[in-house]
Image (tube, rainbow, N blue to C red):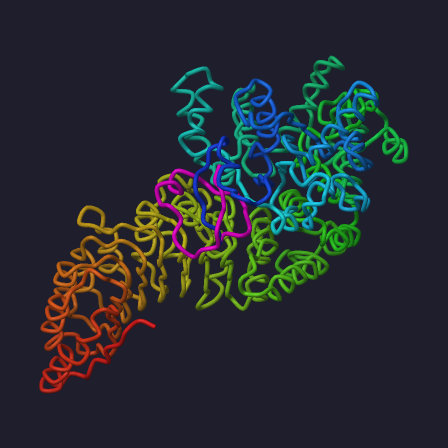
Amino acid sequence: MIQKEKIQRGRIDDEFVRLSITGKIDDILLQKTPVNLTNIFSEIGNRRNFVLIEGAPGSGKSTLALHICQEWAEGKLFQEFDIAILVKLRDPLVRKAITISDLLPCTNKAMANETETAIMSLYGKGVLWVLDGWDELPSDLPRDSIINKLIRPDMSRESPLHESAVIVTSRPSSSAKLHPRVSSRVEVLGFTPHELEQYFKECLKGDSQAVQTLLERIRENPAVEGSCYLPLNASIVVNCFLSDNHSLPTSNHGIFISVVQSSLKRYLQEKLGKTTPVGDITSPDSLPSEIRTETVQMCQLAYHGIEKNKATFTDNDLAALRITKEISNVGLLQTVPSIISDGHLVYYCFLHLSIQELLAAIHISLMSPKQQISVFQKLFGNPRFSAVFQFYAGITKLSTSRPILSKLPRFLCPVPATVFDLVRKVVKTEKEKKYFEPKILLLSLINCLYEAEDSRLCVFVANLLNHNLDLDRTTMNPIDCLSVGYFASVCSNSSNGFTLSLSNCSIGDQGCKFLVRGLSKCPNSNNDIPTKGIHIAEIIENTSSISKLDLSYNAIGNNGLCTLCEALSTNTSLKTLNLRNCSLTISDDNGAALYQLLNTNNSLEYLNLSDNTVTSCRHIAAGLAVNKTLRRLDLGNCKLTDQSIEELSTGLINKIKALQIWGNTSITEDGMKTLARHLTTHCSELTRLLIPDHLISCIKTVFRDTNKERKRNGLPEINVHLFV
């Protein structure tokens, strides 16, 4: 887990991010630090104890909520609280709760009222509320709901619950309104690569050979590999591996399709004694007759829940939709007794929200094309729109099923006009956002394009974006990076000068790896060649014409730098590469990647390495000495020393026009004199130099003499400035 406090624009701790993969927290301008569960209340200070725990679907938020309560009950955690109350917000009775007693799992009303009186008498002091599933709570809560009193922003000293501590779990897509109210935000990250391997080892009972086989097969498919950081997805994949035929899903939506198929297969075998093949769940006509009705009804119920923003259903809901209770026997819909009613009320919910979203997408895909788009137009503002639309894109490939259009060649009508309209609406909405707002919906659309694998639709979106994909300040997980890489590779082939801006996206070196791997899915490359073993640089050389790549403020680390430099060393279109504040440490031992880039790339004109650590300029200087295209180099605030300046000077023999070494406080006047002596006879096109503030006196002394010498040698004057 990581905790987010204090707005800042600095780097994320390199070592921590290198070992972790972030989920989709939208506000990435927050300081992120590792946090233990025992410390989530410790640094709040005088603010109210209100912690929001966010995480991607399947990251383990509900498991964590239950774990907190179990640890408290066993005397191991949060013993400063006298009582911990777990409230499953999906419980239908929660929506009707007006008083504290309505939320308490007591055996009788008298006991609940007595407990409420005790809590109210102390203004909630000593009470820890654990509210699980904010994203599963209906948006139309009554104004007098007790939940509103627990989380409302105007909580004052006169409020009857102002001393209570509250933990709320939620998907990030539904929690934006809570951000101003909480005192701390925590993100559940899921598995690191090492933890994933350990998890597989436990599932496979220590069989190291089987673990390596599973990992190798997962790595063959970037989409599956990129989603296995989520514990839920990892558990599904390893169970598929343990199945009879050892088959693995090949896509993100395929992971959840395998869950549905497995449940239907088990229902057929164990409940009905049938060995009939399940068939394709996205096409009900192909299903065995014994499960066809149940599957269609589950899809109908799932869609109804999405439409009404409901995650739970009662007997009345099923009756209104003319759905039989028997669908709960299949195993995808579970029957849950309400804790609040001491088991007297039973409600139904799907095994996971992602299962509901998949089944809803299947239901939508079976409608007419006109109805399909109409549905998504209505769902546009729904917090689960993106998840359903991504499943829909994977199922339908965003292709049409209308009889007339299906007879036309695909190049004439790749997707229905109404899909174009929906895509236009998404792009228009995101383009109207302010520059500092994250583009979550646009990123979701890019994920849909990856699932659909339709290059023509990618080009259509690129044209709407004016060939500039700007996702600055939008946190990206590995699957996001994979999708963006694919989109960039397809679109850059159709235009000259595609711009990719990914500043402040918390990508990390793991995300950087998937960003580059996404390029290998471009349809212009040989689809018969597996991703493993492909020389990434050759792929980019043949498929990419990106002119600008901005990865600033992403902790890609040295591993990510090596991957990028290899990929870009033979690129013939990139002119700008911004790696500012990317948690890089460039030294004698690991600077060879930059030398390779500068030595072999024949298009790069601007390289920004500022706000990183450069302990040696030897490799950079060697690359500059042979590079023929670089015109601007920024090494500001890189901890350069006089020795670094001496090393750098040996490479300044090319046609560089601007050099920035601002912010390097360890450089002395002697270092400036070393640089000045070299510049009297070299760098014939250098006209701009930014130096550290503390060396302001050198402008009128050292460099004044240097410019006189350059004039005698027929070289242009250098304008020396301080960084502003």
In the rendered image, residue 711 lying in the magenta stretch gets the answer no
In the rendered image, residue 20 lying in the magenta stretch gets the answer yes
SS assignment for the magenta stretch, majority: loop
Q: Which of 502 and 593 is in front in this view?
A: 502
Q: Relative to 158, is 625 on the left or the right?
A: left
Q: x and y percent of residue 48 in the render?
A: 60, 43
Q: Where does the magenta region start and end? A: 1-28
Q: Quadrant of residue 124?
A: top right
Q: In which quarter of the image is residue 269?
A: top right
Relative to 399, say whether 671 is above or below.
below
Q: x and y percent of residue 389 in the render?
A: 67, 47
Q: Relative to 314, is 484 on the left or the right?
A: left
Q: Relative to 367, is 178 on the left or the right?
A: left
Q: Relative to 562, is 670 on the left or the right?
A: left
Q: Which of 661 and 380 is in front in this view?
A: 661
Quadrant the C terminus occupies: bottom left
Q: x and y percent of residue 682 in the render?
A: 13, 74
Q: x and y percent of residue 702 in the render?
A: 13, 77
Residue beneath the point at 60% across and 20% down? 73
Relative to 25, say whether 35 is above or below.
above
Q: Nearer the viewer, residue 136 or 72?
A: 72
